[in-house]
Image: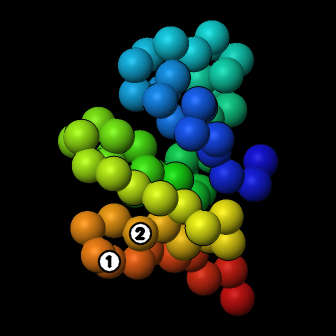
Amino acid sequence: MEHLTQKQVEAYSLHQLSAAELLAVSDHLGECEACRVRVEGVLSGDVVTCSGTGTATFDNATVGTDKT
């Protein structure tokens, strides 16, 4: 899974995922800081955007993952 879609982020935050989807999303969140930041932003009501390159912009700060 590359990054969660906005629909997945919203469904996760609203507890609207099936058991299989919840497992997949939870596993991904355990490994992807950028997607965790996006989910936390939705849960807190903040706007979080994801560049699709492993970085998320949150409250004027950029969070990314270093896979090197």
Q: How many marks?
A: 2
Is residue 34 in view? no
**Is 51 situated above or below 3?**
below
Q: Amino acid at mark 1?
A: Ala
Q: Are marks 1 and 2 in contact (CB under 8 Å)?
A: yes
Q: Amino acid at mark 2?
A: Thr
Q: Residue 26, position in %: x, y?
A: 56, 36
Q: Residue furthest right?
A: 1
Q: Which residue is mark 2?
A: 57
Instruction: State how the image is colored.
Output: rainbow
**Is 33 situated above or below 64?**
above
Q: Which residue is mark 1?
A: 61
**Is 15 situated above or below 61?**
above
Seen at 40% across and 78% down, the residue is 62
Q: Residue 4, position in %: x, y?
A: 63, 44
Separation of disc 1 and disc 2 at Cα?
6 Å
Decide which of 7, 3 is in the foreground and name it: 7
**Is 8 situated above or below 65?**
above
Decide which of 49, 12 is in the foreground and name it: 49
- The image quarter in which residue 17 lies: top right
Q: Residue 7, position in %: x, y?
A: 59, 31
